[in-house]
């Protein structure tokens, strides 16, 4: 019996080896982009060293070039690491690369079917994008809601002022998260999600932050199922199961808020709402075949998670870089003092008059892009790019983290130097492919207009309202700058700094 098992095992190994080499020959014949030679079964998985795939891809591209192919288990992955090729994928051949590759985690709660970020480009996708653009991210709607954002920023400064009186350190990421969470919840629900947003005793803000952070970590975490789809039914890493529980927590929150609104709509108290939830509920009543309660849940999940996590991480990275570099802090504070007056809170109309602040924000996007590989794309048929064939079904990643640190694109790329943008017209709106933290084309982040307003206002208000110093014993030169990889990049060690009264 043992001999029979040995024969069966040997036959399996020979068969797999045959198919492996046959696969290599067939794909090489198709002029795949260059890349490391794949091993049987596991492909190039051993080339991904450690827990930071964006860094592994960047290092490999130095050997194999700006368009590179890898075999990660059974999945062909093509990685783009230059502005010229990013332009090909994100703009010139955008339609061919507009489909999403779905990590297995995204199948939790069927999120891949209902999420605007992950659903296929088509009528429903365009309808949802139009709803978000017209009712949340258009210039007119952003202008109408400016008072909400201003109110939340004033709360943030008041919170920091409390700490400045006692010379205690502020957890910057958590404080900014509280602000953006209630800002988004007011835009969508006309109320705060955290009713005591700056009460350290409540603990709800930390729970929410951990929840959104964990969602992005799970989505970005390496998953055996993505490399070997045959394991999908087993979920060996438990990633989809954990993510499903996180989604369920968010859906319970939304259910409570939506049910509360439905009850108010039945009453005759005369209150009229003009927020995003009202738009979605009206749309679901008018076109129930297009949008229903499930679609609303998943859309709200997209809006809450993306807006809070990305804004928080960008501001925390910016504060870290500025405070550790006294000359940059001095320059930005001098500009703020001259334009709006020392100690004043910024308004959104001030942004255009603060060019150095804008340079600091761009430099943060360059060195610390929040979504380092953007969201993965997928080819639905063979696509030719610069003489190479990207095979049907390939996962396509644009490594904006690597592009931002490429010495062929940027001088002294590892140095945080906002001045590099003084004479540059490079922008983040998806037209300049050396700096595309929000992506480009059909899949560009719909929240870009809001981020473009809120990030510099929060950052400038914090830097203009206080002087800042590190806690005792923390030396700026040795400050920990490690990244925690997920779908987004956050600081491994949260920034804690002391606000000093002016």
Image (tube, rainbow, N blue to C red):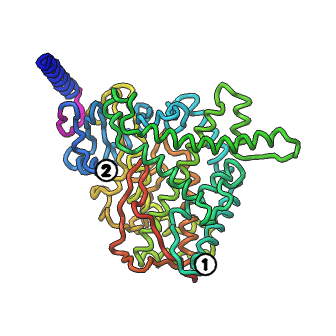
- Evaluate whether residue 264 shows in this view: yes
Considering only vertical position in the picture, is 139 above or below 419? Answer: above
Which labelled disc corresponds to residue 51?
2
- x then y, percent, for residue 149: 65, 60
At horizontal 54% and vertical 36% (from top left) the residue drawn is 115
329 falls in the magenta region: no
35 falls in the magenta region: yes
**Residue 407 location, quadrant:** bottom left
Who comes first in sequence, dot 2 or dot 1? 2
At horizontal 67% and vertical 51% (from top left) the residue drawn is 187
- Other-residue count near label 2 (Cα within 10 Å), few / some / many at <14 / 14–19 / ≥20: few
Name the residue nearer the viewer: 142 or 240: 240
- x then y, percent, for residue 241: 46, 37
Name the residue nearer the viewer: 401 or 432: 401
- x then y, percent, for residue 283: 70, 34
Which labelled disc corresponds to residue 343?
1
Considering only vertical position in the picture, is 161 above or below 205? Answer: below
Quarter that holds the C terminus = bottom right
Q: What's the magenta region?
A: 29-39
């Amino acid at each position: 019996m043992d001999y029979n098992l040995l024969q069966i095992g040997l036959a399996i190994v020979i068969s797999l080896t045959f198919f492996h080499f046959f696969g290599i020959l067939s794909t090489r014949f198709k002029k795949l982009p260059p890349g490391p030679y794949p091993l049987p079964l596991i492909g190039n998985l051993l080339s991904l060293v450690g827990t930071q795939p964006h860094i592994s891809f960047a290092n490999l591209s130095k050997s194999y070039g700006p368009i590179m192919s890898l075999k990660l288990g059974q999945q062909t992955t093509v990685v783009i690491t230059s502005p010229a090729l990013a332009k090909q994928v994100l703009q010139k051949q955008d339609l061919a690369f507009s489909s999403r590759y779905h990590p297995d985690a995204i199948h939790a709660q069927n999120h891949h079917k209902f999420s605007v970020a992950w659903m296929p480009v088509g009528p429903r996708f365009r309808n949802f994008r139009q709803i978000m653009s017209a009712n949340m991210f258009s210039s007119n709607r952003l202008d109408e809601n400016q008072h909400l954002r201003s109110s939340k920023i004033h709360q943030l400064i008041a919170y920091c002022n409390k700490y400045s009186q006692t010379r205690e350190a502020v957890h910057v990421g958590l404080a900014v998260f509280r602000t953006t969470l209630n800002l988004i919840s007011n835009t969508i629900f006309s109320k705060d999600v955290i009713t005591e947003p700056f009460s350290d005793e409540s603990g709800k803000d930390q729970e929410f932050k951990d929840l959104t952070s964990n969602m992005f970590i799970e989505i970005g975490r390496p998953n055996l199922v993505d490399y070997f789809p045959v394991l999908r039914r087993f979920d060996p890493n438990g990633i989809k199961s954990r993510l499903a529980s996180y989604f369920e927590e968010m859906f319970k929150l939304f259910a409570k808020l939506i049910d509360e609104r439905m009850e108010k709509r039945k009453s005759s108290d005369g209150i009229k709402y003009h927020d995003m939830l009202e738009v979605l509920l009206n749309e679901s009543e008018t076109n129930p075949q297009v949008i229903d309660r499930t679609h609303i849940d998943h859309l709200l999940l997209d809006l809450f998670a993306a807006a809070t996590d990305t804004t928080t991480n960008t501001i925390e990275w910016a504060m870290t870089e500025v405070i550790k570099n006294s000359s940059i802090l001095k320059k930005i504070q001098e500009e703020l003092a001259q334009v709006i007056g020392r100690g004043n809170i910024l308004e959104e109309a001030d942004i255009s008059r603060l060019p150095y602040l804008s340079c600091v924000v761009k430099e943060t996007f360059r060195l610390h892009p929040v979504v380092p590989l953007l969201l993965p794309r997928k080819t639905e048929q063979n696509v030719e790019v610069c003489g190479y064939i990207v095979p049907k079904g390939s996962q396509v990643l644009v490594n904006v983290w690597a592009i931002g640190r490429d010495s062929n694109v940027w001088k002294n790329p590892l140095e945080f130097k906002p001045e590099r943008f003084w004479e540059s017209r490079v922008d983040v709106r998806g037209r300049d492919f050396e700096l595309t933290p929000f992506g480009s084309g059909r899949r560009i982040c719909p929240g870009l207009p809001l981020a473009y307003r809120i990030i510099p206002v929060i950052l400038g208000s914090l830097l203009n309202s206080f002087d800042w110093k590190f806690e005792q014993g923390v030396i700026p030169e040795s400050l920990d700058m490690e990244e925690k990889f997920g779908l987004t990049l956050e600081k491994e060690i949260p920034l804690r700094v002391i606000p000093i009264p002016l």
